[in-house]
């Protein structure tokens, strides 16, 4: 067994930081009024782990090839750590205002990132499942972190029940695949199915017709797709998303809309393009249908939402459909399709986290109690440009990017996704994506109508904490820079996916 501890140094630092935060909170900060130290330790641990990643040697396999460190894994680990750092920054003052400034929040947040990092490097279905469960259980806790809020409790319970069901489907799919191939290792399964295709391509036993002739392989493929589609909130496994996003703490919702999605898609890339690459004709058709349904349902239902948090939840579903479009294209144009997926995921992380951060920062006066409470509805954004022009402008940047208007990251990301579909001779799928993107302009720009063209209807206030605004500036700047200078990042994305093939 190859025990190269250097390759897992980032994971070790994240684990030690999580344990350290819990220890500091138990023995020191529990007696302090200001618990900012918890966030500082968390950010320090993530910063060290991030700085270690570029210096690790790529294409390293450890623990008998269960864990692989390649450019794709390093890229996604950077995405997780960047998203986690932004989440920690926007959470500092938010948790204080809500009265839940506890070390457990940061500890569980770090454990969720650890699960994602394990998923990014997993070269075996068992390790994928372990990382998946570590991430998912952490989000069960984070969703219900506001334990005195009934909506937060409801969100956690719904996520727990439906998430447990999806995990069971995924695990059962793994067991069936093991029954067919005799292994859970991704590289071995890829070789096995490819060999079967080569030796039996003209026979009934050929893997090309295996989905029809081998019920276990067929059922395994369906269950694996069901489990993964749940994690990325794709139709028809999206039903948990609006309620959980609305009920969970806004900082958790922001991270949940980015982190688990990215982790789910990196697993999809490894499972579908590598392990089940020989079955691409079968899963390609299924994913194309799911992609169309996902982006269409997400965009159409988002139009009817008055609650901005629910609207962004359905928007998140729609964007999962766009990314699935890129994975479908990857079946035919491996490098271009996969690179567009990786590029879009990082772009989406900045713009979506930014949109949720503006929502988190804005508060309104409750007419009954006179207290400042979180702003959630479209009416709460009315006249924001008159109250706080800078916040309004930042929201404009994020809404333009989510819509796909140049010169933002969202425009370039969608361009690469749709062009990969065109290169794969899936012009009809690219056209459906463009139409859905046009539909989404209605509800994204509607927020800007309220911000710039409506008179204020409630007393508004904006969180002016320095940590939150540092995060906002970083995300807005990244959204614009990626849109203006996309080539550098796209070349990095392209280089990261080459290791898959």
Image (cartoon, rainbow, N blue to C red):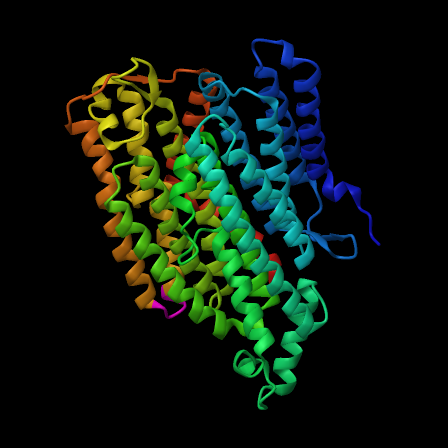
Front residue (pair 84, 457)? 457
Magenta stretch? Answer: 422-426
Position above or below: 495 against 148: below
Query: Does the magenta portion include 123?
Result: no
Front residue (pair 2, 447)? 447
Q: Quadrant of residue 28?
A: top right
- Residue 334 located left or right of residue 316: right
- In this rendering, does residue 481 appear at all? no
Position above or below: 58 against 9: below
Residue 24 position in % (x across, y down): 68, 19
The residue positioned 64% from the left and 69% from the top of the image is 177
Q: Quadrant of residue 46?
A: top right
- In this rendering, does residue 223 appear at all? yes
Query: Does the magenta portion include 423?
Result: yes
Q: Residue furthest bottom?
A: 203
Quadrant containing the C terminus is: bottom right
- Residue 378 located left or right of residue 284: left
The residue positioned 59% from the left and 51% from the top of the image is 72
């Amino acid at each position: 067994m190859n025990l190269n501890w250097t390759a897992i140094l980032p994971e070790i630092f994240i684990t030690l930081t999580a344990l350290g935060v819990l220890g500091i909170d138990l023995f020191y900060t529990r007696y302090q009024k200001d618990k900012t130290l918890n966030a500082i330790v968390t950010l320090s641990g993530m910063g060290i782990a991030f700085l270690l990643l570029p210096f690790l040697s790529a294409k390293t396999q450890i623990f008998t090839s269960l864990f692989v460190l390649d450019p794709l894994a390093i890229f996604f680990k950077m995405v997780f750590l960047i998203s986690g750092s932004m989440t920690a920054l926007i959470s500092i003052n938010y948790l204080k205002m809500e009265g839940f400034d506890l070390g457990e929040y940061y500890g569980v947040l770090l454990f969720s990132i650890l699960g994602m990092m394990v998923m990014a490097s997993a070269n075996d279905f068992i390790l994928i499942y372990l990382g998946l469960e570590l991430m998912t259980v952490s989000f069960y806790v984070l969703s219900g972190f506001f334990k005195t809020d009934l909506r937060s409790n409801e969100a956690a319970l719904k996520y727990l029940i439906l998430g447990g069901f999806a995990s069971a489907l995924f695990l059962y799919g793994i067991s069936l695949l093991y029954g067919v191939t005799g292994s859970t290792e991704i590289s071995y399964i890829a070789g096995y199915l490819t060999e079967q295709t080569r030796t039996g391509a003209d026979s009934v036993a050929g893997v090309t017709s295996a989905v029809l002739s081998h019920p276990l392989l067929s059922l395994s493929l369906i269950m694996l797709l069901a489990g993964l589609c749940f994690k990325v909130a794709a139709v028809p496994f999206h039903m948990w998303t609006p309620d959980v996003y609305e009920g969970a703490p806004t900082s958790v919702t922001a991270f949940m809309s980015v982190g688990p999605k990215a982790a789910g898609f990196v697993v999809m890339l490894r499972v579908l393009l590598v392990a089940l690459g020989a079955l691409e004709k079968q899963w390609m058709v299924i994913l194309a249908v799911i992609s169309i349904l996902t982006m269409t349902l997400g965009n159409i239902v988002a139009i009817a939402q008055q609650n901005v948090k629910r609207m962004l939840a359905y928007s998140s579903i729609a964007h999962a459909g766009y990314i699935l479009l890129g994975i479908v294209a990857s079946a035919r144009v491996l490098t271009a399709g996969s690179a567009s997926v990786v590029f879009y995921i990082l772009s989406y992380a900045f713009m979506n986290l930014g949109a949720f951060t503006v929502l988190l920062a804005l508060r309104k006066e409750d007419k009954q109690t006179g207290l400042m409470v979180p702003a959630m509805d479209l009416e709460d954004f009315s006249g924001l440009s008159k109250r706080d022009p800078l916040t309004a402008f930042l929201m404009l940047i994020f809404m333009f990017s989510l819509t796909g208007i140049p010169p933002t990251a969202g425009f370039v990301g969608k361009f690469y996704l749709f062009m990969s579909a065109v290169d794969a001779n899936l012009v009809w799928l690219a056209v459906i994506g463009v139409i859905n993107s046009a539909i989404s302009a209605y509800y994204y720009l509607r927020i800007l109508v309220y911000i710039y063209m409506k008179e204020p209807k409630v007393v508004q206030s904006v969180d002016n904490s320095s940590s939150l605004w540092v995060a906002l500036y970083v995300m807005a700047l990244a959204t614009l820079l990626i849109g203006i200078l996309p080539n550098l990042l796209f070349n990095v994305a392209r280089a990261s996916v080459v290791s898959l093939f």
